[in-house]
Amino acid sequence: MNRKYFRIVLFTLVLLYGVVVSKGGSPSQGGLSEDVEPLELPKILRSREEFIPYLKKRGIRVDPPSACTGNEDISREVRAYQSTVDTIVRLATEGAFKGKTFHDVAEYVDTFGHRITGSESLEKSIDYIEEILRQNGATNVQSEEVGVADWRRGQEIATMLTPREKSLAILGLGQTIGTSILGITADAAVFSSYEDLMANLSSVEGKIAVLNYGGPADDPLGVTDNGYKELANAGARAALYKSATTFSIYSPHARRANLYYDGVTPEIPIAYITLEDADLLTRISERGERIRIYLNMQNINRNSTSRNLFADIRGKEKPEEFVLFSGHTDSWDVGQGIQDDAVGVLLAVEAFKVLKSLNLIPRRTLRFAFWTAEEYGFWGSAQYIKDHSQEFGNLSAVLEADYSCLASTGLVYYGVPELACILEEVINLVGSATTGLLAMAKKMSTDLDNFVPLNIPTISLLGDDGRYFWYHHTEADAITAGSVNSTELDRCLALWTSTAYIIADLQNKVTRMTE
């Protein structure tokens, strides 16, 4: 046998042996112990069966594919749009717009980077979107001022001093207070659950609290029972929470501090640490070893102004009625804010261009809305509601893409069964351009949450494939291999444009919950 091929065969046999051992073990070793729990690795979700439990943890219920029972009239009306949807899908996935969303999103984030509220980069990015809309024939283009926070991250250092020295990666939460210029040096009190904290609350006084847990029901994104109020009042000097994510490659996450502060006094410095460091500190603590940490967090917190941006495709028959079609322009100050929410902004812009290029003018006005200050708690949309609530009798529905586009997974709504039927039929019309999930959620943790109490129907693009919170609010939320896929962006554009057009063009406004 040729020596080169012998080496290849030998290498292959070694690899195969490794796989066999890892799965079943050699006869002499007996494999892995049966009482060892297998590691559940994160994965990309593909099937309906995989999505259902994943979304349930987010409070999102996947509807069975039978929403149109009892809504046959509206079902027939939506199915009549098949040829229009076919044209939109072809243009987005095969025609002139194939690859365009990826190109334009990349140019947008490469030009402006992150766009934290209060920053010059955010305001310049809004100017950029406004100019594109004007150049492409938008009407009623206008901005409306919003008072916002202008919090700027300064130096952030966290170091474990004992039992050995190790740097800890952290991200202070938006609007957290800082430490003194000298920082804090203190022992750490480590807690693996809310119950653990409550049982040992007296141990936290004068210490840096390390909280290695997320929210209830194993949801790392939840903040219920986070223990901040209790530990702050018990005299903790700072709080280091494990990052709100399901997966980590040593990546701390950003978030807003007011999820924890929420009117609680005193306020203490609060930051996220990586899952790896949270587990490390827990293991050391469980061995009874003393942990001492140095923490220094500097920042500036002041007030500023930003603006919401609006533009219309004026309705041809009922222009006084309108549908809001939105995304948010701000991001956190890490990464490029690509999935959260440059994708949502540019999908709206591309949808505008698609409709204009096809001369598709819906019956009612399609109002494109680009919210500011979403990351601090939906401030832009809240200001809009305050200023425009008298117009909401004419508002049919609110759409927002703020759940990424890692894949064209489907749609999430909150409203009556009639709305579910409309969206189920839209998904059917779009066909292979979406995985086809239809789900219902009252809370999406987006600007849509501000409209739900008003009983206004809401629709969200679902672009998560199980990986959204790997990248969410981290340096990895950028144009990176695997995180942004041109084909999936095209599919999202096809689904999202079709949804917006049909909702705005139906004979009647979408029925509200109270009607």
Image (spheres, rainbow, N blue to C red):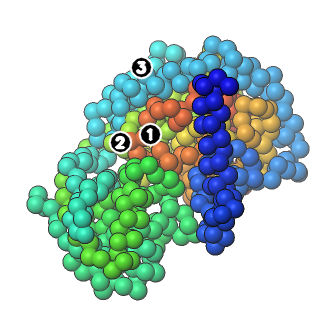
Instruction: Please report the residue visible at 74 percent of the width from the left and 46 percent of the height from the top.
Output: 47
Q: Is residue 457 left or right of residue 296?
A: right
N-terminal label among 2 and 1: 2
Q: Mark 2 or mark 3: which is in front?
A: 2
Instruction: Please report the residue visible at 26 percent of the width from the left and 58 percent of the height from the top.
Output: 166
Label 3, label 1: how far apart the Cα atoms are: 25 Å
Label 2, label 3: how far apart the Cα atoms are: 26 Å
Q: Which residue is mark 3?
A: 131
Q: Mark 3 or mark 1: which is in front?
A: 1
Quarter the C terminus occupies: bottom right
What amino acid type is highlighted by mark number 3? Glu
Label 2, label 1: how far apart the Cα atoms are: 8 Å
In what element is the residue under mark 2? loop
Label 3 near label 2: C-beta < 8 Å?
Answer: no
Q: Which mark is residue 477?
A: 1
Q: Quadrant of residue 187?
A: bottom left
In what element is the residue under mark 1? loop
Q: Quadrant of residue 392?
A: top right
What amino acid type is highlighted by mark number 1? Asp
Q: Is residue 147 left or right of residue 456?
A: left
Label 3: few (<14), some or many (≥20) within 10 Å? few
N-terminal label among 3 and 1: 3
As rendered, which of 256 and 474 lies closer to the eye?
A: 474
What amino acid type is highlighted by mark number 2? Val
Q: Which residue is mark 2?
A: 334
As rendered, which of 20 and 321 lies closer to the eye?
A: 20
* Residue 361 pos. (x, y %): 66, 22
As rendered, which of 20 and 501 lies closer to the eye?
A: 20
Q: Is residue 232 visible?
A: no
